[in-house]
Image: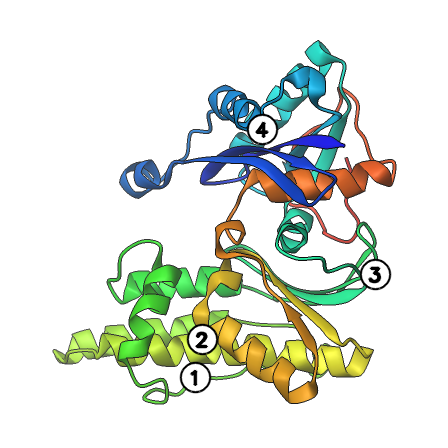
C-alpha cells in the first residue's frame, strides 16, 4: 500500500511516498529556513514537492492508496495550506484523506529506520513539545509526562540566541558544546512531587539569560562554549532522568527517541548509556528523519488508515491538539 504524505506544519514543506508504512520510495523537503532567518515567517509551497515526490517514487496519483496530511499541531497558516491541498487532491483523485498528528508522525520516523514495533516508551522532544509517551500500539498512545512550560527544543534555541550563536540555536549549541566544560555552570533540575515525569525548562532558560545579562552589565566576557555545554548537559539530564524513571516504573525495556531534538548528540549519547546500564533496547531515528519530513507522516498515515482513520472534506487544521486524544 502506497501512502502520499504531506507535511507543512512549520518551516518545512514536504511530500513523500511510503510503502506499507516502512519503505520510503521518495522524500522531498523544501525548507524556508533561509527566508525564516530573514523575515521570521514561512511560506509553504505544496504542489511542486508533491509532483517531485510522485516522480521520485516512479508513480502517479492513480497509484496512491491514500493521502496522509499533518493537520495538527503547528503554525495554523502553514497547516491550512497542506490540509486544503490534500483535500483538493483527494477529491480530484478519489482518494481517502488520512489526518495525522504531527508528533505521532515523529514517533513513526523510527518505523522508517528499523523494525521496531509497539509497545515501547518514547521520548518526543522538539522545539514545541517535550513528552514521555507509552506507545501501546501504532495508534494507541498514552501521555505519561510532559513539559509544564517551555519545550526542551525551545529552551535550547533561545539559549543559543542569547549566546549569540547562529540560528537554529539548539543545533549551534550541540556543535559548540564539545569545546566547553559541561560542569562549568550549575543549573536547576526542576521536579514536581505530584507529577514525577513532568518537565520544566523555563527556569533553565531564564538562568542562562541571566548569566549573560549579568556578565554584560559588569563588562565581563562569557565563556560561550562552557555555558553552552553546561546548559545542554542540564537539559539532557532533565530529559533522561525522567525518561529513565518512567521506564523503570512502567516496566518498559524498549526505549525510543523522536522529534527534532532526537538529533542532539548529547541526548543520543546519554540515552545509549542509560539503556546499556539497564540492558534495554534503544531505537533512534536516522538523522535525516529527525526533523520535520513527510515520510514520517506517510508512515503514520499508513497505520492510521489500517485503524480506520480517515476524514471527509470538513477536515480542518489546529494549532494545538493532544497527541493521545486527537480529534478532527
Q: Residues within 10 Å of mark 4 (few under 14, many from 20)?
A: some
Residue at the left extreme, as displayed: 219
Above-or-below relation of 3 to 186:
above
Quarter of the figure with the C terminus: top right
Q: Which residue is mark 2?
A: 204
Q: Which mark is residue 57?
A: 4
Q: Which residue is mark 1?
A: 187
Helix, strand or loop at label 3? It is loop
Q: Toward the viewer: 243 or 147?
A: 243
Q: CA distance from mark 1 to mark 4?
A: 48 Å
Residue at the top extreme, as displayed: 92
Is residue 131 something that shows in the picture?
yes
Q: Earlier in the sequence, mark 1 or mark 2?
A: 1
Quarter of the figure with the N terminus: top right
Q: Earlier in the sequence, mark 1 or mark 4?
A: 4
Q: Earlier in the sequence, mark 3 or mark 2?
A: 3
Q: CA distance from mark 4 to mark 3?
A: 31 Å
Helix, strand or loop at label 2? It is helix
Q: Which mark is residue 136?
A: 3
Q: Earlier in the sequence, mark 2 or mark 4?
A: 4
Q: Residues within 10 Å of mark 3 (few under 14, many from 20)?
A: some
Q: Earlier in the sequence, mark 4 or mark 3?
A: 4
Colouring scheme applied when the structure was drawn:
rainbow
Is the C-beta separation of discs 1 and 4 under 8 Å? no
The number of numbered discs placed on residues in the rendered structure image is 4
Helix, strand or loop at label 4? It is loop
Q: Residue at x 62, y 44 (%)?
A: 296
Is the C-beta separation of discs 2 and 4 under 8 Å? no
Labels 1, 4: front one? 4
Rendered location of residue 104, percent (x, y): 69, 50
Amino acid at each position: 500500500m502506497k501512502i502520499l504524505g504531506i507535511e507543512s506544519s512549520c518551516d518545512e514543506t514536504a511530500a513523500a511516498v511510503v510503502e506499507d508504512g516502512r519503505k520510503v520510495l521518495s522524500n522531498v523537503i523544501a525548507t524556508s529556513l533561509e527566508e525564516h532567518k530573514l523575515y521570521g515567517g514561512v511560506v509553504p509551497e505544496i504542489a511542486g514537492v508533491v509532483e517531485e515526490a510522485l516522480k521520485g517514487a516512479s508513480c502517479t496519483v492513480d497509484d496512491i492508496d491514500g493521502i496522509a496530511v499533518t493537520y495538527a499541531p503547528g503554525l495554523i497558516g502553514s497547516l491550512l495550506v497542506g490540509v486544503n491541498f490534500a483535500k483538493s487532491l483527494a477529491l480530484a483523485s478519489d482518494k481517502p484523506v488520512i489526518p495525522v498528528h504531527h508528533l505521532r508522525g515523529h514517533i513513526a520516523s523510527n518505523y522508517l529506520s528499523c523494525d521496531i514495533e509497539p509497545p515501547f516508551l518514547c521520548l518526543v522532544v522538539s522545539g514545541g513539545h517535550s513528552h514521555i509517551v507509552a506507545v501501546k500500539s501504532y495508534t494507541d498512545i498514552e501521555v505519561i509526562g510532559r513539559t509544564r512550560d517551555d519545550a526542551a527544543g525551545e529552551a535550547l534555541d533561545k539559549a543559543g540566541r542569547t549566546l549569540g550563536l547562529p540560528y537554529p540555536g539548539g543545533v549551534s549549541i550541540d556543535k559548540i558544546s564539545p569545546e566547553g566544560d559541561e560542569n562549568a555552570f550549575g543549573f536547576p533540575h526542576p521536579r514536581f512531587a505530584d507529577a514525577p515525569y513532568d518537565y520544566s525548562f523555563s527556569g533553565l532558560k531564564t538562568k542562562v539569560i541571566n548569566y549573560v545579562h549579568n556578565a554584560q552589565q559588569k563588562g565581563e566576557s562569557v565563556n560561550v562554549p562552557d555555558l553552552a555545554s553546561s546548559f545542554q548537559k542540564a537539559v539532557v539530564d532533565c530529559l533522561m532522568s525522567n525518561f529513565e524513571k518512567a521506564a523503570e516504573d512502567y516496566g518498559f525495556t524498549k526505549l525510543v527517541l523522536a522529534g527534532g531534538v532526537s538529533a542532539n548528540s548529547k541526548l543520543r549519547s546519554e540515552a545509549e548509556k542509560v539503556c546499556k546500564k539497564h540492558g534495554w533496547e534503544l531505537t533512534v531515528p536516522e538523522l535525516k528523519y529527525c526533523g520535520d519530513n513527510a515520510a514520517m507522516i506517510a508512515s503514520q498515515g499508513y497505520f492510521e488508515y489500517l485503524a480506520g482513520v480517515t476524514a471527509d472534506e470538513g477536515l480542518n487544521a489546529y494549532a494545538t491538539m493532544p497527541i493521545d486524544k486527537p480529534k478532527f
